[in-house]
Amino acid sequence: MLRSAAATAFSILALTALLTPACGGDDDDDPTPSGSDPTATTATSNGGGEDVTVTVGDNQFSPSDATVSSGQEVIWEWSGSNPHSVVGEYMGAAVESIQLTGSGTFVWSFAQPGTFEYECGVHGTAMSGTITIK
């Protein structure tokens, strides 16, 4: 029951985020940034406006650690054949993607400085990562 309540709360939060205009006036609906290197072990976006893409592969997030500026988006992009999800907590709110296999994306904008530690909802801490927001 708790899992269902958390999923419902996340759905409402995600819908609110989708319906709320993004900061910075970015009208680009294309969630795939150019110049992403999914093979890197760390990624940094230093306020230059480029979002960070984390590849959700078979049993790993790549990069597993990334740093972004407040207001920038992190895009998790599925590429593996196993089911995975993104689960964590940011500023007291649950952040949870749906479980996907093979392809798809999950986008989250981090509005305030802090740390977002996350894991795969299927594999737990064996598949985890950290986003540092400056």
Image: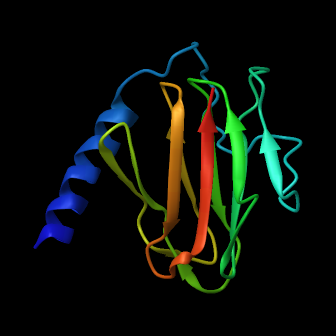
Q: Where on the picture, by quarter, is residue 13?
A: top left
Does 64 sit left or right of 71 as displayed? right
Does 6 sit left or right of 93 as displayed? left
Residue 41 vs 51, above or below: the answer is below
Across and down, in percent, residue 53 comes to 72, 49
Across and down, in percent, residue 3 comes to 21, 70
Q: Where on the picture, by quarter, is residue 50?
A: top right
Residue 116 vs 122, above or below: the answer is above
Q: Residue furthest top?
A: 24
On the rendered image, what quadrant is the N terminus found in? Answer: bottom left
Q: How is the image coloured?
A: rainbow
Residue at horizontal 87 percent and vertical 57 percent from the top: 40
Residue at horizontal 77 percent and vertical 40 percent from the top: 33
Instruction: Using the image as rendered, state which of residue 65 and residue 15 is in the foreground.
Output: 65
Q: Residue furthest left?
A: 1
Residue at horizontal 37 percent and vertical 34 percent from the top: 17
Number of numbered callouts drawn: 0
Across and down, in percent, residue 28 comes to 64, 28
On the rendered image, what quadrant is the C terminus found in? Answer: top right
Q: Which residue lies furthest to the bottom in this view?
A: 82
Across and down, in percent, residue 109 comes to 52, 34
